[in-house]
Image (tube, rainbow, N blue to C red):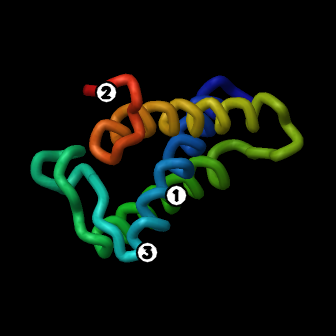
């Protein structure tokens, strides 16, 4: 295994985690921020755009996790790299989108 494989798994975990809120929110019929909204990352995109964006993220995650190197759930460095990417995007999303959806309690009036 090379360090490039671990970088791919990091981004695979990141894309996989990012796919979840977009796909689930879209399936539930909810609008949510995407890079295609106006303004990007702040405005809302339709539920259809979110489903498509979620599935695109899932496809990228699949390509990075299943087709780069030999990702194994039994190989701790592989799992840690993917988990680190997922945790990073999860924390970023919680902080960024919490401003729009009431999730940041540090910004009280």
Dot 2 crowding, Cα within 10 Å, few <14, some 14–19, many 20+: few
Cα distance, mark 3 to mark 1?
12 Å
Between 12 and 22, the one lying in front of the other is: 22
Cα distance, mark 3 to mark 2?
29 Å
Between 20 and 74, the one lying in front of the other is: 20
Q: Mark 3 = which residue?
A: 28
Residue 104: x %, y % from top left: 39, 33
| Residue 45 position by quadrant | bottom left
Mark 3 or 2: in front is 2
Q: In the figure, is residue 1 to the left or right of 4?
A: right
- Of mark 3 and mark 2, the one earlier in the sequence is 3
Q: Are marks 2 and 1 in contact (CB under 8 Å)?
A: no
Mark 3 or 1: in front is 3
Residue 97: x %, y % from top left: 34, 41
- Of mark 2 and mark 1, the one earlier in the sequence is 1
Describe the element under mark 3 as helix, strand or loop.
loop
Dot 3 crowding, Cα within 10 Å, few <14, some 14–19, many 20+: few
**Residue ID at (24%, 50%):** 35
Residue 14: x %, y % from top left: 52, 41
The C terminus: image quadrant: top left
Q: Mark 2 = which residue?
A: 108
Answer above or below: position of 3 versus 95: above
Mark 2 or 1: in front is 2
| Residue 51 position by quadrant | bottom left
Describe the element under mark 2 as helix, strand or loop.
loop
Between 85 and 6, the one lying in front of the other is: 85
**Residue ID at (28%, 69%):** 49
- Of mark 3 and mark 1, the one earlier in the sequence is 1
What's the mark number on residue 20? 1
**Residue ID at (24%, 69%):** 46
């Amino acid at each position: 295994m090379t360090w490039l494989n671990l970088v791919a798994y990091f981004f695979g975990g990141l894309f996989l985690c990012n796919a979840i809120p977009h796909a689930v929110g879209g399936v539930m019929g909810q609008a949510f921020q995407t890079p295609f909204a106006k303004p990007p990352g702040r405005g809302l995109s339709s539920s259809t755009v979110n489903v498509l964006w979620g599935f695109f993220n899932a496809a990228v995650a699949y390509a990075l996790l299943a087709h780069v190197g030999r990702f194994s759930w039994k190989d701790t460095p592989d799992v840690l790299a993917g988990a680190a990417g997922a945790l990073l995007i999860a924390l970023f999303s919680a902080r960024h989108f919490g401003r729009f959806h009431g999730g940041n309690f540090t910004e009280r009036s």
